[in-house]
Each structure stands twice: as structure tokens, then as C-alpha cells.
Amino acid sequence: MILAINNRRSIRKFLDKPISQDDITEIIQSGIKAPSSKNRQPWKFIVVQEYEKEEMLNAFRRGNFQGRTRNSITSGKQAVH
């Protein structure tokens, strides 16, 4: 684990390449299993792609994001967006 910590990098350039739905699901499923205080698991995951990305960013800027999208992956207690 120390090696992973010492060799970590902060990525500042990203490829303009779509991420597969399978990869996104796997990443979110792994995040759901992360430890939390008193096992509360308070997180929500939101994935916004393509044309909805700019619309979502504008909603955040306006402060009127409702926290739901049309596609959800349900896993255990948490809904994954």
C-alpha cells in the first residue's frame, strides 16, 4: 500500500474518449464498498455524459439540481445515478 501511495499521480490531462457503461458501473460499485463513518455510506454517485453534461453543469450553477436522472443503477440501499 505504501508503494501505491508514494507512486500516485495527479492527472491533469484527460483523453477525450468515452468511458464504457461497464467501466462506469464497476467503478461505482467499488466506490459503494468504500468504508464510511458508522457504516452510514452517505454518498451519491452521478454520471453525466454527452449533451446532458452542460445542462447539468448549468443546473449546479443555478443551484436547482434535483439529484435524479432518467437512468439509475440500483445497488443495495443506494441508487447509483
Image: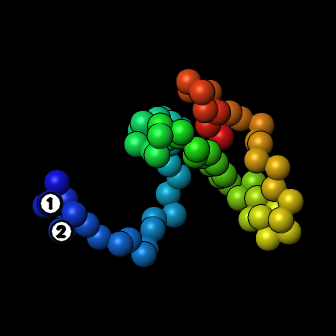
Is 65 situated above or below 57?
above
Q: Which mark is residue 2?
A: 1
Q: Amino acid at mark 2?
A: Asn
> Which residue is at the front of the view, 60 or 13?
60
Question: Helix, strand or loop at disc 1?
Answer: helix
Is 47 rendered above or below residue 2?
above
Q: Nearer the viewer, residue 72 or 38?
A: 38
Amino acid residing under circle 1? Ile
State the residue at coordinates (77%, 42%).
Answer: 68
Asked if residue 56 lies left or right of residue 13, the reply is right
Give the vertical position of 45 relative to 56 (above or below).
above
| Residue that sits furthest to the top in the current view | 76
Q: Which residue is mark 2?
A: 6
Q: Nearer the viewer, residue 9 or 77?
A: 77
Residue count near mark 1 (Cα–Cα under 10 Å), binned few <14, some 14–19, many ≥20: few
Q: Is any atom of residue 20 visible in this view?
A: no
Q: Is residue 17 left or right of residue 55?
A: left
Res 25 label = none
- The quarter in which the N terminus is drawn is bottom left
- The residue at the far left in this view is 3
Quarter placement of the C terminus: top right
Q: Position of residue 76 (x, y in %)?
A: 56, 24
Q: Position of residue 36 (x, y in %)?
A: 45, 45
Q: Position of residue 28 (x, y in %)?
A: 49, 41
| Residue 79 found in image quarter | top right
Q: Secondary structure at mark 2?
A: helix
Q: Quadrant of residue 44?
A: top right
Above or below, comparing residue 67 to residue 39 in the picture: below
Quick check: marks 1 and 2 in contact, CB under 8 Å?
yes
Residue visible at 83% across and 65% down in the picture = 63
